[in-house]
């Protein structure tokens, strides 16, 4: 009974986070100077997690990004949000503009989460 309530709460959190992401969000991050600028995978993951937590009022979700985001307009990368129950939600990040060493990007989650692997 208790476990079912936790799963329901996690599912509700995942649905809330997914609904927020689906609305579309944007962010910008200043990075070290290089040509073109890059935002490390760890920094991108951390920034996305902070933005979602601030938007939803929930704890920071577990987000991982497999590669750095290159500061070139139109560049995309895929990150993954993993819920407590193991289900995952893909997030597409797209560079919208670059101002010097600052990368501006939008992000949007997939419409449907993938269930946890058994």
Image (spheres, grey):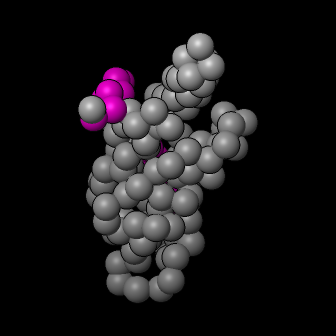
* Residue 16 sits inside the magenta stretch: no
Q: Residue furthest right?
A: 57
Extent of the magenta region: 103-117
Q: Which quarter of the rendered picture does the C terminus lie within? A: top left
Q: Residue at x 40, y 66 (%)?
A: 41
Observer-nearest residue: 68 or 62?
62
User: x and y percent of residue 34 in the render?
Assistant: 40, 86
* Residue 113 sits inside the magenta stretch: yes
Q: Which quarter of the rendered picture does the N terminus lie within? A: top right
Observer-nearest residue: 62 or 26?
62
Q: Quadrant of residue 95?
A: bottom left
Q: Residue at x 59, y 42 (%)?
A: 52
Q: Can residue 110 be seen from the camera position used here?
A: no
Number of marks drawn: 0
Q: Quadrant of residue 12?
A: top right
Q: Residue furthest front?
A: 1
In this rendering, is residue 68 above or below 116?
A: below
Q: Residue furthest top?
A: 1
User: x and y percent of residue 93 in the render?
Assistant: 38, 49
Q: Residue at x 47, y 61 (%)?
A: 44
Q: Is residue 77 left or right of residue 27?
A: left
Q: Can residue 112 be seen from the camera position used here?
A: yes
User: x and y percent of residue 81 in the render?
Assistant: 43, 43
Q: Residue at x 40, y 37 (%)?
A: 86
Observer-nearest residue: 45 or 26?
45
């Amino acid at each position: 009974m208790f476990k079912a309530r936790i799963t329901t709460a996690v599912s509700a959190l995942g649905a809330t986070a997914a609904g927020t992401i689906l609305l579309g969000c944007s962010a910008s991050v200043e990075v070290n100077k290089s040509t073109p600028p890059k935002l490390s995978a760890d920094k991108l993951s951390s920034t996305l997690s902070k933005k979602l937590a601030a938007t939803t009022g929930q704890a920071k979700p577990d987000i991982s990004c497999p590669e750095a985001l290159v500061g070139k307009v139109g560049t995309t990368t895929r990150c993954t949000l993993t819920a407590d129950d193991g289900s995952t939600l893909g997030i597409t990040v797209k560079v919208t503009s670059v101002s010097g060493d600052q990368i501006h990007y939008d992000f949007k989650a997939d419409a449907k989460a993938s269930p946890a692997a058994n």
